[in-house]
Image: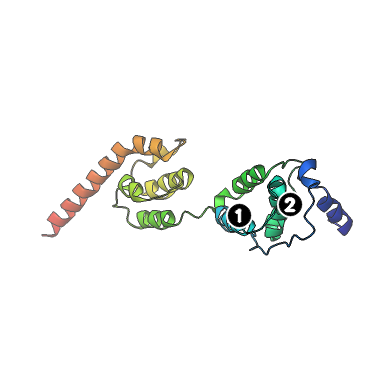
Amino acid sequence: MTYKDLLKKVKQSPFTQSVADTVFLVNFHTPSFLKFDGMTDPHEHMYQYLQVMHGTTMPREIRDAIMCKLFPQSLKGPALKWFCQLTLKSIGSFKEMTKDFIENYSVNVNLGATSKMLCTIIQQTDERFSIVLVEIPKFDDIIALFVLKRVLLPRLSFLDEICNWKPRTIAKALGRTRRMIEVEGLRRTTKLEHLNHSRR
């Protein structure tokens, strides 16, 4: 892309006319933002952005538009490129800006304790998946289903039975796998008892 093309792209705002036409106050000082490059949790970045913006003073009637116009200044690298490629005049409010941003970077959501707990489940395959999952304060269905189907269950004997499943939530998946997990657990227990008995 040439400099001329880049300049043209920058001028093609993804904001609607009403947002694009909103003018900053003369005495407004643009705050400093932590830059998001597309590699971290979008929720955390949005929280940081909102905290900074809530500390600024501006008329209520232009606040939403100003929050839209300043948001790209909190982006860098691939994230800024993503913003520049948004559909022309597709963003008419900060709510829409937030929705597009979160959806695009949802894969980076930091589940905190959830990730650690799921890693523990992977390492300790004798643990009941459903029991441990209940103890997690916050989990994402997509991540949990991925771990259940791709990481934990391949170590079990009924992989062929679940390879074509397409449950929408972890609750539905667990409801269907609960009995098989219990059967698998019983098999392991029986096998372990048999092994211990043969060592005597």
Q: Is residue 92 above or below residue 124?
A: above
Q: Earlier in the sequence, mark 1 or mark 2?
A: 1
Q: How many marks?
A: 2
Quarter of the rendering containing residue 145: top left
Position of 111 with respect to 88 (left or right) is: left
Is label 1 in contact with label 2 (beta carbons under 8 Å)? no
Residue drawn 20% across the image and 53% down it: 192
Residue drawn 80% across the image and 41% down it: 17
Residue 198 at what x, y percent from top left? 14, 56
Position of 69 with respect to 126 (left or right) is: right
Secondary structure under tag 1 reads: helix
Q: Report the amino acid beneath label 1.
A: Leu
For mark 1, what is the residue?
A: 50
Would you call the spot at circle 2 few (<14 residues within 10 Å), some (14-19), or many (20 or more)?
many
**In which quadrant will I find the N terminus?**
bottom right
Residue drawn 30% across the image and 47% down it: 131
Q: Nearer the viewer, residue 33 or 138?
A: 33
What whole-number distance in Å separates the C-alpha atoms at marks 1 and 2? Answer: 13 Å
Would you call the spot at circle 1 few (<14 residues within 10 Å), some (14-19), or many (20 or more)?
few
Q: Is residue 46 above or below residue 31?
A: above
